[in-house]
Image (cartoon, helix red, strand yellow):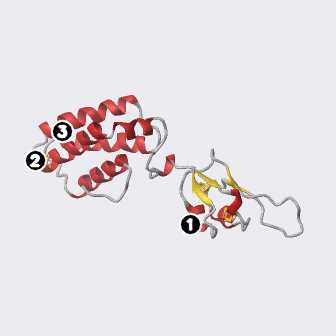
Amino acid sequence: MTTATACPVLAVKEGLERFARKEMCGRCLPCPAGVLSAIAALERFSQGAGTQRDLELLSRVGELLPQLARCPRGQNAGEQVAKLMAEEGEALRAHLAGRCPAGECASLVKYKVVPEKCTMCDECRRACPQDAILGEPYVAWRGDNRPYQIILELCNGCGACVEACPEGAIEKL
Ligand code: SF4
Ligand code: SF4
Ligand code: SF4
């Protein structure tokens, strides 16, 4: 269950998703029931919608799946959840509070424009699928040119503006 993400919540979720897609055979009930409910709970965590009940659910899956799964593949899936619960309490609590410390869960990442770097080129505003960026292109004769701004409430963390900005002026909050 290897993965490139630095966020343990996403890493375990993606590992379980791969297992569910490619290996899980469904011959015994605890495996699909535990794995699919853990994926759903981790998805909620990655979107900042995780709850205390999700934590309890993950605890149960981590405790019971290694015992109840009929084969090592299912047991290993349960152990991944158990390891997450045992070693990543801080990351889980952060997600519960709506933060992803690794900055990998797109729904929890917000961006800002660094005013000193912004040349008001308008690339980010045109790239934003959410219309979350305010600003007007630089006009030489105008005295009130202002750096662009991101409306956090509209931003979904997709990162398209970061890709589009030629100045590297958009950073994670
Ligand atoms: S534990 Fe093994 S046998 Fe049971 S559903 Fe999962 S992969 Fe299949
Ligand atoms: S991260 Fe995406 S949604 Fe947020 S401001 Fe940038 S382009 Fe728009
Ligand atoms: S793309 Fe970068 S430099 Fe251009 S307006 Fe947006 S933040 Fe400013």
Amino acid beneath label 1: Glu
* Residue 81: image location, x then y, percent: 26, 42
* Residue 45: image location, x then y, percent: 41, 41
* Residue 79: image location, x then y, percent: 20, 43
Q: CA–CA distance between discs 3 and 1? A: 41 Å
153 on left or right of 53: right
User: How many residues crowd mark 2 within 10 Å: few (<14), some (14–19), many (20+)?
Assistant: few
> Which labelled disc corresponds to residue 65?
3
52 on left or right of 86: right
Where is mark 2, residue-wise?
A: 71
Mark found first going from the N terminus, 2 or 3: 3
Q: Assess mark 3: CB under 8 A from ligand 1?
A: no
Amino acid beneath label 2: Cys
User: How many residues crowd mark 3 within 10 Å: few (<14), some (14–19), many (20+)?
Assistant: many
Observer-side mark, 2 or 1, equals: 1
Where is mark 1, residue-wise?
A: 163
Image quadrant where residue 144 sits = bottom right
Question: In percent of the image, x 30 and y 32: which residue is there?
Answer: 57
Q: CA–CA distance between discs 2 and 1? A: 44 Å
Q: Assess mark 1: CB under 8 A from ligand 2?
A: no
SS of the residue at dot 1? helix
Q: Where is ligand 2, by quadrant?
A: bottom right
Image quadrant where residue 88 sits = top left
> Which labelled disc corresponds to residue 32?
none
Amino acid beneath label 3: Leu
SS of the residue at dot 2? loop
Question: In percent of the image, x 72 and y 68: which residue is there?
Answer: 121
Mark found first going from the N terminus, 3 or 1: 3
Q: Assess mark 2: CB under 8 A from ligand 1?
A: yes
Question: In percent of the image, x 48 and y 42: which residue is there?
Answer: 99
